[in-house]
Amino acid sequence: MIIFEMKEFVLTVSEEAWGLLPFKAILKRDKNRNKETAFKEMLFIFYYVDIKSDYMYITDSAIRSREIIKDIGLPTDWKIDSTIQEAIDYYTRMSITPTAKLYKSALKAADDIAKYLEMTDVLLAERTDKGAVVTQLSTVTASLKAVPIIMRDLKASYKELITEQKDLEGRTKGSKTLNIFEDGITGFD
């Protein structure tokens, strides 16, 4: 089953998703007739967790959370509670593949490299007790030369990840099409 789907530039939540216990709890607690809060919370989960989210470039989860809350119109005092955390954990567990996990780790590493490069003025000014340079200029320039390679590899990794997800979402078994959440899930009796 596909939990989230982009249709005509609008993210939708599948009807089947509401039957899964972590998501059903979100729907059940929203007492409004139009279930606007439940829908926004599901959008939050998608944007917060899904590798295809436009917010995944924000590797700091607190900053990513604040940006998503602001952008989807949740109240500014809204926080991830136990119900939302359970749904986040469930969606993460059910949707992450080894490839996606690797890609997320690569994004974090690229972010760490960017932070290093943002501090070059401090690094180049740093000296030992005897006045020797701690970080050599050649170390910084070597890092700069690696940036285009890292960018190219991240783009290629993302394309490979999207291809994998499309393959997983469209697998067939007999005449039935299986999606990412439907194949090989055990222990949910």
Image (cartoon, grey):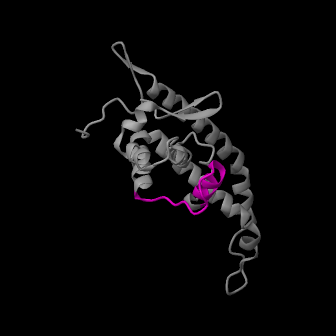
Magenta segment: does it hold 80? Answer: yes
**Residue 97 appearing in the image:** no
Is 71 located above or below residue 140 in the figure? above
Q: Residue at x 44, y 28 (%)?
A: 168
Q: Residue at x 50, y 43 (%)?
A: 35
Q: Nearer the viewer, residue 76 or 102?
A: 76
Q: Residue at x 26, y 37 (%)?
A: 186
Q: Nearer the viewer, residue 69 or 151?
A: 69
Quadrant of the snapshot with the C terminus: top left
* Residue closest to the far bottom: 129
Magenta segment: does it hold 25? Answer: no
Quadrant of the snapshot with the N terminus: top left
**Residue 6 appearing in the image:** yes
Image coordinates for residue 160, horizontal then vertical, percent? 55, 32
Image coordinates for residue 38, horizontal then vertical, percent? 49, 46
Region of the chain picked out in magenta, as a range:
63-82
Is 12 located above or below residue 170 in the figure? below
* Residue closest to the far left: 189
Is 131 located above or below residue 122 in the figure? below
4 lies left or right of 72? left
